[in-house]
Image (cartoon, rainbow, N blue to C red):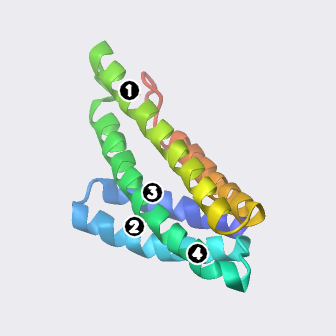
Amino acid sequence: MRKITLFIAAFLFAAVTFAQSNKEEVDLFQAAAGMQKKEAVAAFVHPSDAQKDAFWKLYDEYEVSRKINGQKRIQVLEQYAKQYKTMTDAQAEAWMKDVIALQSSTDKLIITYYKKVKKATSPLVATQFYQIENYILSVVRSEILDEIPFLGEKK
């Protein structure tokens, strides 16, 4: 797990760096990070030979949607970075609506694909998928919270 945690930390550092960059660079970075993430998932999710094709097809489908949420996360963070020093009540409310909607969408996505993976493979494989995705997501969320200043905090 330590290797995944280090990878995710590096990913987040680069994502924050790229957040100021253009969309093509973010897409390129997400593609490269996605390949490394897939290797990490392969180390923890163990479908049988008969289940592999179904699992990886669903995983690739899941990653397309997850990357869309990743793009939205970068946009929300960019918005926060631009506004946090002078954020008004209205901006804070709008930002929180976006954050809550994004978090809910991400959580629902993992649950949706847990169910799809369970149906196509087995409850064991689906649970492994759910665990690793939630672990990675928890590390990402923790690292993001660690990096962004609280409202009113001097940084």
Say which label, 1 or 4, has the lower sequence index. Answer: 4
Query: Mark 1 falls on what kind of element?
Result: helix
Disc 2 marks which amino acid?
Gln
Q: Quadrant of residue 17?
A: bottom left
Disc 3/disc 1 C-alpha distance (Å): 19 Å
| 120 to the left or right of 87 | right
Report the residue marked by disc 4: 54
Disc 4/disc 3 C-alpha distance (Å): 18 Å
Quarter of the image where the C terminus is located: top left
Report the residue marked by disc 1: 97
Disc 2/disc 1 C-alpha distance (Å): 25 Å
Report the residue marked by disc 3: 66
Residue 69: x, y in percent?
40, 51
Say which label, 2 or 1, has the lower sequence index. Answer: 2
134 in relation to 28, above or below:
above
Disc 3/disc 2 C-alpha distance (Å): 10 Å
Say which label, 3 or 1, has the lower sequence index. Answer: 3
Q: Is 95 in front, or is 84?
A: 95
Query: Mark 4 falls on what kind of element?
Result: helix
* Residue 30 marker: 2
Disc number lying in front (2 or 4): 4
Residue contact between numbered discs 4 and 3, judged by CB atoms under 8 Å: no
Quarter of the image where the N terminus is located: bottom right
107 in relation to 13, above or below:
above
Disc 3 marks which amino acid?
Arg
